[in-house]
Amino acid sequence: MVDGTVKSEGRIKDRLEGVISEMIERGILFPDAVSNFEKQFIAKVLKRHKGHISKTAGTLRMHRNTLSKKMEKYHLT
């Protein structure tokens, strides 16, 4: 399954490069891109864990308090 994982990572990398190119073309600034990515990533994992903060923090490999602060920052309550 290593070959499948490598191919999958390659496809993700290709898609990400396309998104980055589009963001640059649209004039999206780096800090805004990072914030938007972080917000969307956290929101997806929160949804996957049905809002369970401890499980979400575990999946994200961050402390619960850090996650709570980021949720407040991005209005993800």
Image (cartoon, rainbow, N blue to C red):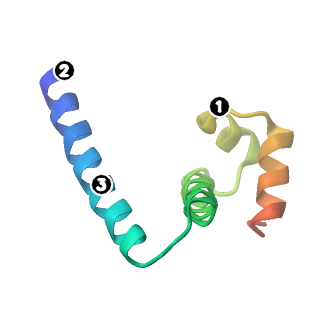
Q: Is residue 45 visible?
A: yes
Residue at numbered disc 2: 2
Residue furthest to the top? 2
Q: Position of residue 31 (x, y in %)?
A: 63, 60
Mark 1 and mark 3 lie on one chain; the one further toward the N terminus is 3
Residue 21 screen position, x and y as percent: 32, 64
Identify whether 1 is placed above or below 30. above
Amino acid tagged 3: Glu
On the picture, is 13 further left or further right than 36?
left
| Residue 1 in view | no
- Indicate which label's residue lies in the foreground, 1 or 3: 3
Residue mark closest to the camera, 3 vs 2? 3
Residue 42, how many percent across, how many down?
A: 62, 54
Q: Which residue is mark 1?
A: 61
Q: CA distance from mark 1 to mark 3?
A: 25 Å
Q: Which mark is residue 40?
A: none
Secondary structure beneath disc 2? helix
Write down the residue under mark 3. Answer: 17
Q: Work out which quarter of the rendered image holds the C terminus and state it.
A: bottom right
- Report the amino acid beneath label 2: Val
- Amino acid on which disc 1 is placed: Arg
| Residue in view at x 75 percent, y 47 percent | 53
Q: CA distance from mark 3 to mark 2?
A: 22 Å
- Identify the secondary structure beneath mark 1: loop
Residue extending furthest toward the bottom: 26
Q: Quadrant of residue 8?
A: top left
| Label 3 crowd (10 A; few <14 / some 14-19 / many >=20) | few
Looking at the image, is mark 2 or mark 1 earlier in the sequence?
2
Which of 55 and 22 lies nearest the eye of the viewer? Answer: 22
Label 1: how many Cα within 10 Å (few below 14, some 14–19, many 20+):
few
Q: Nearer the viewer, residue 27 or 12?
A: 27
The residue drawn where x is 61% and y is 60% is 43
